[in-house]
Image: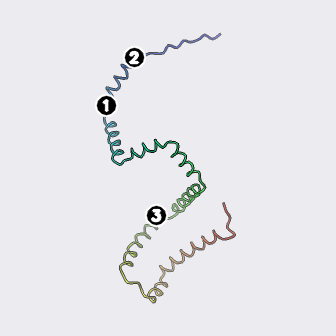
Amino acid sequence: MAKAVTVLPVIKPAKEETERKLEAAPLQHAEALLDAYRTLQTLHDTHTLEVVRGLLGAGDQVLTEVVSVATSPQSTRAIRNLLILTNLLGTVDPDALHRITSTVTPVLTETQASEPPSLFAMVKRLFSADVRRAMGTGLSVLEAVGRALGPGATKK
């Protein structure tokens, strides 16, 4: 038959131990305490503590509102769309996008400061290889969008 094991807890003088730890804490954790004070002061200066206090005061009301917004069909669609757009942006070559933005920015600035080109000048530019390349890319994208929106497109 099994015998009962008696467990005798080790009782430390809690008050003296706690006082000793408190006295040693500022020295051991001086940098952490200074960082905590700086963070607290920044939260105070930016009025973030007031916002947190207000949120805590509103309590269940804020939580109920957040949950109702987060569970709405619009939020679900927005999150799904954001993930899809993130996936799309992940497929774009960053170097190509950088080249496009660094080329387009000066052109936009120049266009705003100058007179609009004549109709003849615009038609002439339509036949350049760069314009045809951009128009071809744009038309391909439009064609893909039209195909996705067409009656034969399947919903997932």
Residue at the spot of label 2: 13
Q: How many badges with numbers are in the image?
A: 3
Residue found at x 40% / y 84%:
116
Looking at the rendered structure, the kind of residue marked 3 is Pro
Q: Secondary structure at mark 2?
A: loop
C-alpha span from label 3 to label 1: 49 Å
Residue at the spot of label 3: 94
Could you say which quadrant of the image residue 15 lies in?
top left
Mark 3 in CB contact with mark 1 (< 8 angstroms): no
Sequence-wise first label, 3 or 1: 1
C-alpha span from label 3 to label 2: 64 Å
Whole-percent x, y for residue 78 in the image: 56, 58
Whole-percent x, y for residue 75 in the image: 57, 55
Q: Residues within 10 Å of mark 3 (few under 14, many from 20)?
A: few
Q: Residues within 10 Å of mark 1 (few under 14, many from 20)?
A: few
Mark 1 in CB contact with mark 2 (< 8 angstroms): no
Mark 3 in CB contact with mark 2 (< 8 angstroms): no
Judge by depth and name the residue closer to the eye, 1 or 120.
Answer: 120
Sequence-wise first label, 3 or 2: 2
Circle 3 or circle 2, nearest the eye: 2
Left or right side of 23 for 56: right
Residue at the spot of label 1: 26
Residue found at x 45% / y 15%:
10
Could you say which quadrant of the image residue 74 lies in?
bottom right
Q: Is residue 106 above or below residue 37?
A: below
Q: Secondary structure at mark 1?
A: helix
Q: Secondary structure at mark 3?
A: helix
Looking at the rendered structure, the kind of residue marked 2 is Pro
Left or right side of 20 for 148: right
Residue found at x 59% / y 53%:
72
Judge by depth and name the residue closer to the eye, 70 or 98.
Answer: 70
